[in-house]
Amino acid sequence: MPVFHVFLSWTALFLLFLIVISFGYCLYVKHIHTKYDHIPGPPRDNFLFGHSPTFLRLMKKGDIIHDLFLEWAETYGPVCRINILHYVALIVTCPKATKEILMSPKYPKDRFYSKIFNLFGQRFLGNGLVTARDHEKWYKQRRIMDPAFSSLYLRGLTGTFNERAEKLMTTLTDVADNMTEASMLHLMNSFTLDVIAKVAFGVDLDLQEDRSIFPKAIETCLKGMLYIARDIFYEYKLKNRPFIKKVREACRLLRTTGAKWINDRKTAMQNGDDVPKDILTQIIKTAGKVGFFFLRVKKEVDDVVGMKQEISYDDLGQLVYLSQVLKETLRMYSTAPGTSREILEDIVIDGIHIPRGVSCYFSSHATGRMEKFFKDPLTFDPDRFHPDAPKPYYCYFPFALGPRSCLGQNFAQMEAKVVMAKLLQRFDFTLVPGQTFDIMDTGTLRPKSGVVCSVRHRDQNK
């Protein structure tokens, strides 16, 4: 009997402790609300979870959360508050604030953003170039990487871009000869990964012919990253255990494979063996030291490239309208929809006092589709980016801005222009019935329906 009384006493104390902790936490959440509720924003779904129930509903429906950010930005103004538990984030669409915060090194990436790159206890990207919050640590890594992405080095990669693009052309030629259909999303994903593997690691994946496990592993990791960001309780739900296991396995596959490629290359260089002059070699060496538009763009490709197979670096510079088409595509369909920074000191944005301790999210998806920045924003108009047109003022940033902008943006645009020119040079594409322009969010934004097309050889007389 005394043992039973002791057990009840300890149970009562434990429950009292939980009640005190819960009450204290609720008071803290109330304090946060009081501190930041002067900032405009949509009504919270409930006191404790804030707006997270709305985000979860969107995820279950398969809707794009960035469209909601666009709606809120247009409704509540250039600074819009979001609450999740005791966390506060701001959607910022003010160009002046975008310039001030993104162009300065004193605003680090926020802690929550960095944490999502550790997927369910399995290291994914770690504390690397994308995730490092400390500016000095990031800067040291960036200095090592910069020479591998210099314009001089990228000029030498056009041969690889052409070679891999030709493999894609061969695949599409078979499709056109057999008058069948092709999933352009799958083919372009495979092409991109082929190019990265070749120019970065000197590895031939040949994904055009062989469906590798790597694209699936990358997609799985990106989905895991997305679920962690949107649902803080995701890993604690039993029904999610099978997927969590897949994410951990995918992380291990990508990291162990990458580590093997790097170690093999280091060993080969130490042994004096011949090694590819690719990005990996450059990095290791440096680290050792320190509609109508469619016809128009076709005509431009014909005038600049003609029917030659090898597209040179100088050719890319002459494909001006093709560059405009690419930029306009990224405005409407930004692959990376935004970036975030942590505010470590009080600031004022658009006349609104912002106390320190919040994260500011800058949505290129939202600003790229706002009427006040781009007239008739849902109309595809490459002339917005004509060389003589006014430059968008800190409202167009598909590769982010400032010192933390995407290191590989020139690489990506060169690769895209080479393959776009070859596609326009040789084929005509027609979307099959049922295809849409809807987007899905898998950590990056991509077409929802796969862009399945019928492919035909282009009539060169047209």
Image (cartoon, grey):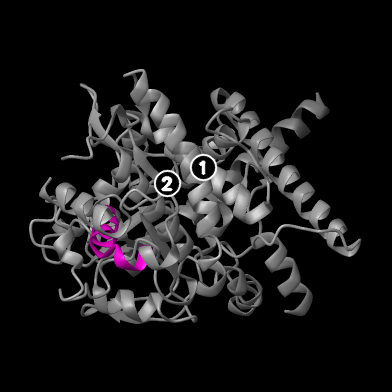
Q: Quadrant of the N terminus?
A: top right
**Measured along the vertical axis of the image, is residue 327 above or below residue 173?**
below
Classify mark 2: helix, strand or loop.
loop
**Measured along the vertical axis of the image, is residue 229 above or below residue 32?**
above
Give the residue displayed 31% in from the left and 32% down from the top: 451
Of 126 and 282, the residue lying toward us: 282
- Secondary structure mainly formed by the magenta segment: helix
Is residue 90 rendered magenta in the image? no
Q: Quadrant of the C terminus?
A: top left
Residue type at mark 2 is Thr
Residue type at mark 1 is Leu
Give the residue displayed 82% in from the left and 52% down from the top: 264
Circle nearer the N terminus (1, 2): 1
Give the residue displayed 34% in from the left and 25% down from the top: 176
Quadrant assignment, res 146: bottom right
Answer left or right for 452 relative to 217.
left
Q: Are marks 1 and 2 in contact (CB under 8 Å)?
A: yes
Residue 31 x, y percent position in the rendering: 39, 64
Q: CA distance from mark 1 to mark 2?
A: 7 Å
Query: Dot 2, crowdedness within 10 Å: few (<14), some or many (≥20)?
Result: some
Residue 43 x, y percent position in the rendering: 23, 51
Residue 376 x, y percent position in the rendering: 8, 56
Q: Which mark is residue 222?
A: 1
Q: Dot 2 corresponds to which residue?
A: 444
Of 220 and 449, the residue lying toward us: 449
The residue positioned farthest toward the left in the image shown: 376
Is residue 322 rendered magenta in the image? yes
**Measured along the vertical axis of the image, is residue 84 above or below residue 253?**
below
Query: Dot 1, crowdedness within 10 Å: few (<14), some or many (≥20)?
Result: some
Magenta stretch, residue numbers: 316-329
Quadrant assignment, res 432: top left
